[in-house]
Amino acid sequence: MSQGSTSAARTDEGAPPFLRLFGRYLRDQGLPVTSQREAVARVVFESDDHLSVDDIESALRETGERIGKATIYRTLDLLVRSRLVEEHDFGEGFKRYEHRLSNHPVHEHMICVECATVTEFESDELYKIENRVRAEYGFIPVRRRLEIYGLCEACQDAGVELTTEGLICPIEII
Amino acid sequence: MSQGSTSAARTDEGAPPFLRLFGRYLRDQGLPVTSQREAVARVVFESDDHLSVDDIESALRETGERIGKATIYRTLDLLVRSRLVEEHDFGEGFKRYEHRLSNHPVHEHMICVECATVTEFESDELYKIENRVRAEYGFIPVRRRLEIYGLCEACQDAGVELTTEGLICPIEII
DNA sequence: CTCAGTGCAAACCGTTTGCAGAACG
DNA sequence: CGTTCTGCAAACGGTTTGCACTGAG
């Protein structure tokens, strides 16, 4: 936008790393690098949160860019395909997106059922599980998804209790 | 349905265990045990699959029961609340439901990205992860979700190869 | 009678798609 | 200049909801 560059960067020099990578992917695929695609990528990579499409849309609005939801969805699809971005579904009825260039390259998620805060953690044990699965079932793991839902420390400190509705241990009640 | 009992079982004797349990839950909550609720429960508990709402609807149609989708959804909500049934989302755009009275009380899922077959496996390692998370972050786990997506043995034997689109290791490419 | 449950159809809402016009190469 | 992208708005599809009707106690 600045420096009077009307078209999308035709040289990568000086561009932030994530734009260089995304640009490379697009060129590999024979797809044009447009300013809208760069704008969406910028929002996603400059945040370390798990962003919803609405989050992205309002972030774009704040920087003055008016980009349609359809374009955001289409660009996110490209980002996910490029493997630079990961798609999450925390059961909220919509998806969230998180770039993969953070300091925690591979991580899982803890989601507080009370305040919905998402905390990341790493797990070596997961590799063991995958190796076992491969050995026992001949199943080749490609992608995994581990989410632990529970009560975060802050909510415990705030005095929140877990309420249990439903049968506690159905099998034994029989 | 048989023995001329026109109304929902007013005594549990002779009813299958899952109906006794579901009935107990409903009574606990002050909700009526209706024939529709029993029919939906019967379908879910008599299958060991991961059923979609459409699966349930057609199973009901085959036994001659005509129950509206809304009622199925409402009953599934009750079954999930009762903890007798688990809700899954394997990223297909709709939910699947699985009862919890099988021989594998606690288990995780492997989903083949090629044929969508779901295989269940158990994982002691998960407990270790949860204990670690509790110790390290003070997070109290309530519910977890581990899904491993990959290629099942049958698809490998059928000669299916995994195709990789996208940047393989973005971080190192920078 | 009363009250909750049911079935239908409409509403909902995140996401996808079709298409006319703009932008890229 | 052809091809792809963008933005708008309409379509989509699983799920939820509003409401008149039914049925149980």
Image (cartoon, coloured by chain):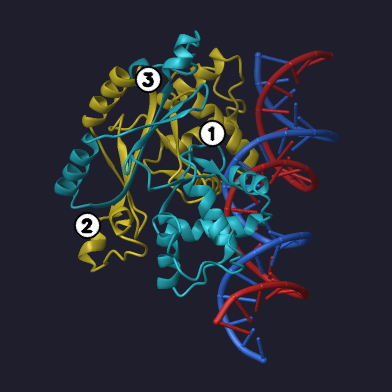
Chain colours: A yellow, B cyan, C blue, D red
The answer for how far apart the CA atoms under marks 1 and 2 are is 33 Å
Residue D5 in the image: x percent, y percent? 66, 27
Q: Amino acid at mark 1?
A: Leu
Residue of label 2: A153
Is residue D8 shown left or right of residue B7?
A: right
The answer for how far apart the CA atoms under marks 1 and 3 are is 29 Å
Residue of label 3: A139
Residue B147 in the image: x percent, y percent? 38, 34
Inspect this view and state whether residue A16 appears. no
Name the N-terminal-most of marks 1 and 3. Answer: 1
Query: Which type of secondary structure does the marked residue at label 3 adopt?
Result: loop
Closer-to-camera residue (B37/B156): B37
Query: Please, which chain is the residue tagged with disc 2 on?
Result: A
Query: Please, which chain is the residue tagged with disc 3 on?
Result: A
Closer-to-camera residue (D10/D21): D21
Q: Image quarter for residue A173?
A: bottom left
Query: Which type of secondary structure does the marked residue at label 2 adopt?
Result: helix
Residue of label 1: A76
Looking at the image, which residue is at 42% across and 23% down? B150
Q: Quadrant of the N terminus of chain B?
A: bottom right
Q: Is residue B10 above or below residue A171?
A: below
Query: Please, which chain is the residue tagged with disc 1 on?
Result: A
Residue A137 in the image: x percent, y percent? 34, 20
Alpha-carbon neighbours of circle 1 within 10 Å: few (<14), some, or many (≥20)?
Answer: many
Alpha-carbon neighbours of circle 2 within 10 Å: few (<14), some, or many (≥20)?
Answer: some
Q: Amino acid at mark 2?
A: Glu
Q: Residue furthest left?
A: B135
